[in-house]
Amino acid sequence: MCGIGGEFRFDGRTADVAATARMTDRMADRGPDGNGLWASGPVAFGHRRLSIIDLSVRGSQPMVDSELGLTAVFNGCLYNYKQLRGELVSRGYRFFSTSDTEVILKAYAEWGGACVRLFAGMFAFAVFERDTGRLVLARDRLGIKPLYLSSTPHRLRFASTLPALVAGGDVDTSVDNVALHHYLSFHSVVPPPRTIYAGVTKLPPATVRTVEPTGSTRDETYWQPSFTRDRPELSDGDWPAAVLDALRVAVRRRMVADVPVGVLLSGGLDSSLIVALLADEGQALTTFSIGFEAEAGESGDEFAYSDLVAARFATKHDQIRIPHDELLPAVPRAIEAMSEPMVSHDNVAFYLLSQAVSRQVSVVQSGQGADEVFAGYDWYPPLAEVPREDVAGAYRRVFVDRSHDSLLALLHPERHVRDVSEAFLAGHMAAPGAETALDAALRLDTQVMLVDDPVKRVDNMTMAWGLEARTPFLDHELVELAAACPPGLKLADGGKGVLKRAARGLAPDEVIDRPKGYFPVPAIRHLGGPFLELVRDALTSRAARERCLFRPEAVNRLLSDPNAERTTLGSNALWQLALLELWLQSMERR
């Protein structure tokens, strides 16, 4: 797990190594164990290293294979790298390291860009071909590892984080009005390729992009589950066992490391089942839970459940309690760790949890993604009986933060655009495949919302502390299986029914049968005191006034009753505005 960056010139000039170094330095938190730079003519690569596999200098990056004429930088982990290495050795390749980075180099030499189809893992990488002068960029199927891009007619830059690109210089940091519309519609999600900055894009998940020396590009999307019933061999009664078998493989894959692996244990079904499966593998487990002070009658922890799971499986358990006086200063630090503005209060929780966990381990498994993959959220049941052709409107009613008219009443007139979010939603829902309305919603959430909200959140907050998070529920083979599962089995038992049945006898019944919980940070959900002052200062600042994102009268209305207005999903509408402004101001200070 690392931070990568680079520049590729199309104008005959040599690459800007100084800019690449600035980008690399900006990602020091992602890779505290080392750094490297490499340049040759029009291309320069930079790398920050977090040592997980092959801790020796032989695993350092950028990695050059002079015999093959290839150079690579890589962020992520290939869980099947040992199997691929064995296959490549049988084909005559010789290895100088035991790292998964070198496996990417040899696999690319053997299979070209199609090598990504053989990879089981999370990855974003760049490969430069010396003999053709071609650059190839790739991102994993579920977008677990990020890759941001900044282009001009003369060059392309890429980096693991958006702030790294900005540190390189020559980036248009004006707010993209289309992206702003998406941000305020989709719970802060801006679908790829856009970001909130007009001059920065992101490579979509499951994409291989080939960039020619002239600057021309071509993209290949190499993976997309059909969300159809393509497993006729499985009866309704077979599905729990099939899901459990696939999850067991996913958990086992993510045990590969040359360092200890812990678990982020929220006390919910997903993380508890991971603990149970790791215990079945004979792992001595270290688990971590976090909690906050209550606010407005809302509890700030789920320790009762996480303690129960820790006791059941005899883990070494660390219960992390965060008082109010530690939470407030962490908010701006968590915002600075974001590659894009992310509204969920979970970000602060993950930031503080990662800080504490990184003192003990450098790799953890996490239950992220199960709700999107197995239909665990409360907006899925209303879609069960909706005709397939009506899914876009039904989804809008249960998920989209506010109507287009409400959005225009909130935005400054200079920021008005047509209803681009409705157009995006309608286009995605109308795409072929996805048999039912629920299948279409799950496809959208798995391929877009999941990637640019919870997955990005986990990557940003854990990597801010040099902590690698692995997500078994996002194993691509498990996701393919879940996509084929009949919707009724997923919605059963109050949501995630097939997963609950798979967990029966492994995880405690009290956890399986509990109401769905969340990662609560009550002081942000119920703004008051110094947290409200932080919000007020940001939204009424000179920078905010000059930026002209929102109508002043709309901001004043929200500030006058800060906890009254909620989005469709129950988030604090004022916090959504403030988070964006706080993030933009933090970027301007860097």
Image: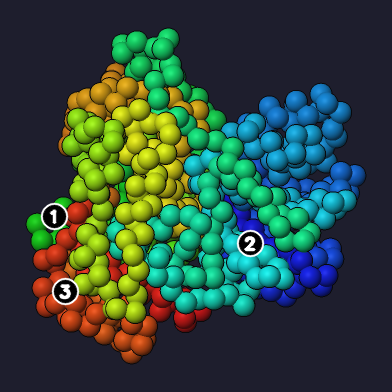
Per the model, the C-alpha gap separating discs 3 and 2 is 38 Å
Q: Give the amino acid at mark 1.
A: Glu
Q: Which residue is mark 1?
A: 298
For the view shown, which residue lies furthest in the bottom direction?
Answer: 542
Question: Which quarter of the figure has residue 430?
Answer: top left
Q: Image point 21% across, 46% down: which residue?
A: 398
Under circle 3, the secondary element is: helix
Under circle 2, the secondary element is: strand
Placement of 305 over or under 566, stated as above or below: above
Asked whether 103 or 205 is in front, the reply is 205
Q: Which residue is mark 2?
A: 158
Residue 443's spot in the image, x, y percent?
A: 39, 38
Q: Image point 55% across, 36% down: which residue?
A: 223
Residue 143's spot in the image, x, y percent?
A: 51, 46
Asked whether 269 or 223 is in front, the reply is 223
Residue 205's spot in the image, x, y percent?
A: 53, 46
Taking the image as shown, residue 514 lies to the left or right of residue 373, namely left
